Structure formats: structure tokens, C-alpha cells
Image (tube, rainbow, N blue to C red):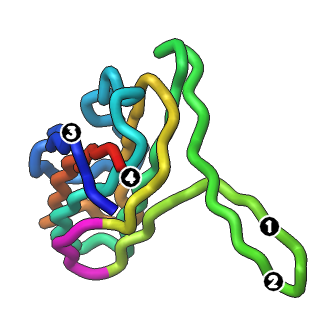
Amino acid sequence: MEFTNIKLEPVRSASILTNAYVAGTVIENAEKYNVMSLLIDFTKGSLTDCQIKVEGSMDGTNYYQLLSDSISAGVNSVAGLVYKLTDNTAGSTTPLTINVKKIKISAIGTGTVTGSSLAISAIMGRI
């Protein structure tokens, strides 16, 4: 497996979180890639946690949250994909398969936002 056409897309500069979802810079022309990982640098501060959601769009108007599924006892359960960070974190996520034109990544802090910080970039690639 070899990656081609790799690009780092800045999504959110390091900044304090809020208690409402705030979208970062929308990634345009995502159809040039088929995998994406998030590069995250999170400082918890006084928060309980931070949650990050990823949404895709084909038209730039209608966004749909990426879904995650799990199988237990032969039953496939589907839910909105949310990355929940409960401790200081610096690293990248497991690669996601993507097939949309635009990607919007949003973050929210739960609890007291004092001392918190979150930076996000997306590592885009084609396998």
C-alpha cells in the first residue's frame, strides 16, 4: 500500500474551545483524496472532554456526519462518528475512507473551557 498525493490541510489553529460546536476551515476538493487522518493537538485545561465531529458534503450546502459502525452478535449498529478526547492528546487518528467533495470538521468543549486548546489539521492522501 503506497500513498500518493499527500497534503496537510490546516483546519483549526490552536485556540480555546467553546461549549458549542464550532466548524474549522472547510476542506475543499476532498474528492482528490480517498483517505484522511486528523492530526490533533489537544490541551484539556479545565474541560471534562472535547468532541470532534467530521461531516461531508457533495454540494457545500448539505453536510452529513460521517458514521461509525460496530458489529456485536451479528448486529451492525451505526452512530455518528465522534472523537471524544478526555486527556491531553497529540497525534493522529486512524485513517478514514472518504468520498465527498467538501469536509467540515467541528469541535466542542464540555465543561469549563479555561486553559483548553485545540488545533486540528487533516492529512489527506490517496491510496
Front one among 67 and 113: 67
Up-down relation of residue 121 to residue 40 (above or below): above
User: Circles 4 and 3: CB distance less than 8 Å?
Assistant: no
Instruction: In the rendered structure, find residue 97 and report the number of the disc placed on it.
Output: none
Q: What is the secondary structure assignment of the residue under circle 4?
A: strand
Dot 3 corresponds to which residue?
Answer: 5
Q: Earlier in the sequence, mark 4 or mark 2?
A: 2
Q: Nearer the viewer, mark 2 or mark 3?
A: 3
Dot 2 corresponds to which residue?
Answer: 72
What's the amino acid at mark 1?
A: Ser
Determine whether, in the image, residue 27 is placed left or right of residue 20.
Answer: left
Determine whether, in the image, residue 27 is placed left or right of residue 117.
Answer: right
The image position of residue 63, as x and y in percent, is 56, 27
Q: Earlier in the sequence, mark 4 or mark 3?
A: 3
Q: Residues within 10 Å of mark 1 (few under 14, many from 20)?
A: few
Up-down relation of residue 12 to residue 52 (above or below): above
Front one among 69 and 19: 69
Could you give the CA–CA distance between mark 4 and mark 1, rounded to whole angstroms? Answer: 24 Å
What's the amino acid at mark 4?
A: Ile
Residue appearing at x 25%, y 66% in the figure:
92
Q: What is the secondary structure assignment of the residue under circle 3?
A: strand
What's the amino acid at mark 3?
A: Asn
Determine whether, in the image, residue 39 is placed left or right of residue 106.
Answer: left
